[in-house]
Image (tube, rainbow, N blue to C red):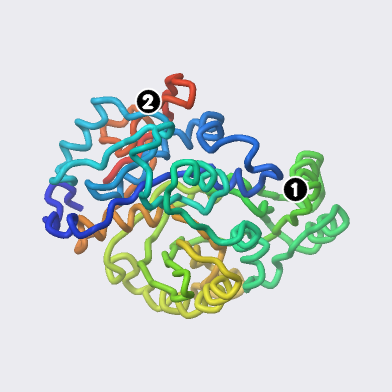
């Protein structure tokens, strides 16, 4: 991949409307909270250093005339690093502190995920921001909703200790327990045995106490993780954006994304992509009928089935009814490198690769937080 000669499409940038981006990547925490308005999203970011760093993610998709709302403007070294890439020939979007007011009045707000916290913030600034009904947002983002379209026979919704004991004994081999609002694999619990341990039980009880089921699945031999990105419009039209391949570690945690032309990304596996696209039409239509609108990422994977020598498609692993890392990579690739495959991945801070996100961020109280990972293009 060449990252030093991006497509010159600067003439298109002036055609895009000015948007205020808010990367509320604490979205899943808000979904899981019984009182989401007890704290602002800026306060929530301060509790999670990764969220502080990810608030700058819109830089990958934003245009020069856009605004990115942040706890604090990034340092000069970060700005110089971005300018050296040559990816923003007309200039970078403006980073504006969240506490500002007049500069936001009347502008359209685009958040990472539909949010009551962002809605409260935007209303105080007389901004154009609308979201689906909150109960619909919670419903379609829950893995219990994705489970409606489950295709793996041994998978189960587990609602109490008795069901957990029975399921662990019935399903052989390694298994995974997932919470309804787990983020990038962090809500997953890998189980190797068939008995219930106290750590497992404590993990599950915390969810059951919130009246949320646990999703149990057999662990599969993953060959290829991929996602498709969509946008459901308020009028219920469903727009295709594109597909990406992404990497996960051995616990299913997200590590990076490949974005590019589908024939290059999928090669001989492209029929699996087409099968997935057909499969997800029904869930997407169901979401639109429920009243959801906004971005949607549909994750899928291809795996080796022990009872079948050929590869098998798991057509819908989960639905992320929000913006995603894959969408950010795809937007960057489509905007600058439409004929190439790009790879965005998290790396240790000592790598010499450039970081597209700052390595130092200020929280809502002005304290400097040092970030643990670089988001790097390869």
- The mark found on residue 360 in the picture is 2
- As helix, strand or loop, the secondary structure at mark 1 comes to helix
Give the quarter of the image for residue 242: bottom left
- What residue is rendered at 14% in x and 43% in y? 86
The percent position of residue 300, horizontal first and vertical second, equals 50, 65
* Most foreground residue, 256 or 358: 358
- As helix, strand or loop, the secondary structure at mark 2 comes to strand
* Most foreground residue, 71 or 253: 71
Residue 370 visible in the current orientation = yes
- The mark found on residue 52 in the picture is none
Residue beneath label 1, please? 207
Mark 1 neighbour class, 10 Å CA radius: few under 14, some 14 to 19, many 20 or more: some
The percent position of residue 96, horizontal first and vertical second, equals 34, 35
* Most foreground residue, 206 or 31: 31
Residue 320 visible in the current orientation = no
The percent position of residue 354, horizontal first and vertical second, equals 26, 35
Give the quarter of the image for residue 221: bottom right
- What residue is rendered at 37% in x and 39% in y? 56
Task: Confirm or deny contact between disc 1 and disc 2 (CB under 8 A).
Answer: no
In the rendered view, would you say 55 is above or below 238?
A: above
Give the quarter of the image for residue 91: top left
- What residue is rendered at 22% in x and 41% in y? 92
Mark 2 neighbour class, 10 Å CA radius: few under 14, some 14 to 19, many 20 or more: some
In the rendered view, would you say 275 is above or below 264?
A: below
Position of residue 67 in the picture relative to residue 32 (left or right):
left
The percent position of residue 361, horizontal first and vertical second, equals 40, 27
Cα distance in 3D space between marks 1 and 2: 34 Å
Residue farthest toward the right in the current orientation of the protein: 162
Position of residue 215 in the picture relative to residue 309 (left or right):
right
């Amino acid at each position: 991949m060449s990252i030093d000669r991006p497509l010159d499409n600067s003439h298109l940038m002036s055609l895009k409307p000015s948007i205020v981006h808010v990367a509320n990547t604490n979205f899943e925490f808000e979904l899981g909270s019984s009182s989401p308005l007890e704290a602002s999203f800026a306060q929530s970011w301060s509790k999670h250093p990764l969220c502080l760093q990810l608030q700058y993610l819109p830089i990958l998709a934003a245009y020069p005339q856009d605004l990115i709302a942040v706890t604090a403007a990034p340092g000069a070294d970060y700005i110089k690093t971005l300018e050296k890439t040559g990816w923003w020939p007309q200039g970078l979007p403006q980073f504006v502190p969240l506490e500002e007011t007049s500069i936001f009045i009347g502008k359209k707000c685009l958040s990472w995920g539909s949010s009551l916290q962002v809605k409260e913030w935007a209303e105080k600034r007389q901004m154009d921001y609308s979201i689906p009904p909150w109960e619909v947002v919670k419903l379609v983002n829950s893995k219990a909703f994705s489970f409606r379209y489950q295709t793996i026979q041994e998978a189960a919704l587990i609602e109490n200790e008795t069901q957990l004991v029975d399921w662990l004994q019935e399903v052989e081999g390694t298994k995974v327990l997932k919470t309804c609002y787990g983020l990038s694999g962090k809500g997953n619990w890998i189980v190797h045995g068939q008995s219930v341990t106290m750590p497992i039980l404590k993990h599950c009880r915390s969810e059951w106490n919130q009246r949320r089921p646990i999703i149990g699945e057999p662990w599969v031999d993953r060959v290829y993780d991929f996602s498709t990105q969509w946008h459901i419009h308020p009028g219920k039209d469903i727009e295709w954006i594109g597909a990406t391949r992404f990497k996960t570690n051995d616990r299913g945690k997200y590590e990076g994304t490949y974005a590019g032309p589908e024939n290059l990304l999928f090669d001989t596996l492209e029929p699996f992509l087409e099968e997935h696209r057909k499969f997800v039409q029904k869930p997407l239509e169901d979401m639109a009928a429920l009243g959801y609108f906004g971005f949607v990422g549909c994750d899928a994977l291809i795996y080796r089935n022990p009872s079948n020598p050929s590869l098998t498609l798991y057509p819908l692993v989960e639905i992320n009814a929000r913006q995603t890392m894959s969408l950010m990579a795809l937007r960057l690739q489509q905007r600058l490198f439409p004929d190439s495959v790009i790879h965005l991945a998290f790396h240790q801070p000592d790598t010499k690769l450039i970081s597209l996100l700052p390595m130092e961020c200020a929280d809502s109280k002005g304290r400097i937080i040092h970030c643990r990972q670089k988001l790097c293009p390869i």
